[in-house]
Amino acid sequence: MKLSQRIKLAREYANLTQKELAEKVGISQTAVHKLECGRSRSSRRTVAIAIVCKVSPVWLETGKGDMAMSAYDSAILMRAQAEGVAEEEEEYRDGIPITQLPLIKWDAVEDWTDRPEESPAQTAKEWISVAPKITHKMYALEVQGDSMEPEFSEGDTIIVDPSTQVSNNRFVVARLPNSKQATFKQLILDGTHRFLKPLNSRYPIQDMPEAATVCGVVIGKFKSY
């Protein structure tokens, strides 16, 4: 089933007209019409559409899993509405908690970082379950190699937030000039100098050039058993 078909099905499931859905999400009726006709192949409003229609954001975005919003997602939504999150439309759209994150490839990190209006969900190779209060701007990465042992082992999943403030000793995902993919290290700030430090003493600390980019701060680690 295509995204256009899922959006139409979700709207009908919620018993909403195109105009009503557009008003609740904060887009034009024409935009909804284009999405349902397939003239728009993607939208950064899919999470908002899912929440309004009370369907799973993951199902609406990818077609995977059940269409209906889980009881857990519904409870989170009710809590957010009770706290007044839904009263501010922009915050409601961009800050609503979800329970899964797109797991993306390392070479795709900077591709979408330069386009903040888009979601990394478009490049997800799969989705992982995480704790509440995760927004659609965040993503997960699998640790590669042993440079961050013993705290982080190869295969562990790190949770990255591009909006968290960068500070000394934070674990970060960074992109070095002329590098094909991002790297995961501890950021060390010494005056005007920046360094990327592996936790494994077998690897040397790296100077972080001025042209290097911090793509996000690691705020947690997820591991399934």
Image (cartoon, grey):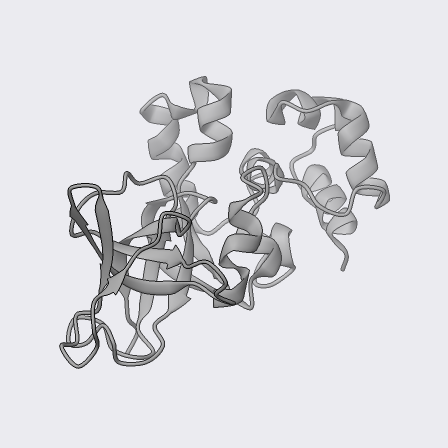
The residue at the point 65 percent across, 36 percent down is 14
| Left or right: residue 97 compared with residue 153 | right
The answer to whether residue 191 is above or below residue 204 is above
Number of disc labels: 0
Question: Image height check: is 164 above or below 18?
Answer: below
Q: In which quarter of the image is the C terminus?
A: bottom left
On the rendered structure, is 47 left or right of 221?
A: right
Identify whether 76 is placed above or below 145.
above
Quadrant housing residue 30: top right
Comparing 33 with 104, the one in front is 104
Q: Is residue 87 left or right of residue 161?
A: right
- The residue lying at 17 percent from left, 70 percent from top is 199
| Residue 123 appears anywhere in the view | yes
Quarter holding residue 142 = bottom left
Residue 2 image point, x, y percent: 77, 56
- Residue nearest the observer in this picture, 211 or 128: 211
Place of residue 214 in the rendered image (x, y in percent of width and height, measured from the top left): 37, 49
Return the x and y of residue 164 as percentages of the image width and height.
Answer: 31, 40
Q: Where is residue 192 in the image (x, y as percent from the top left)?
A: 21, 41
Of residue 61 and residue 145, the one placed in the foreground of this image is 145
Which quarter of the rendering shows the N terminus?
A: bottom right
Residue 57 in view (yes/no): no
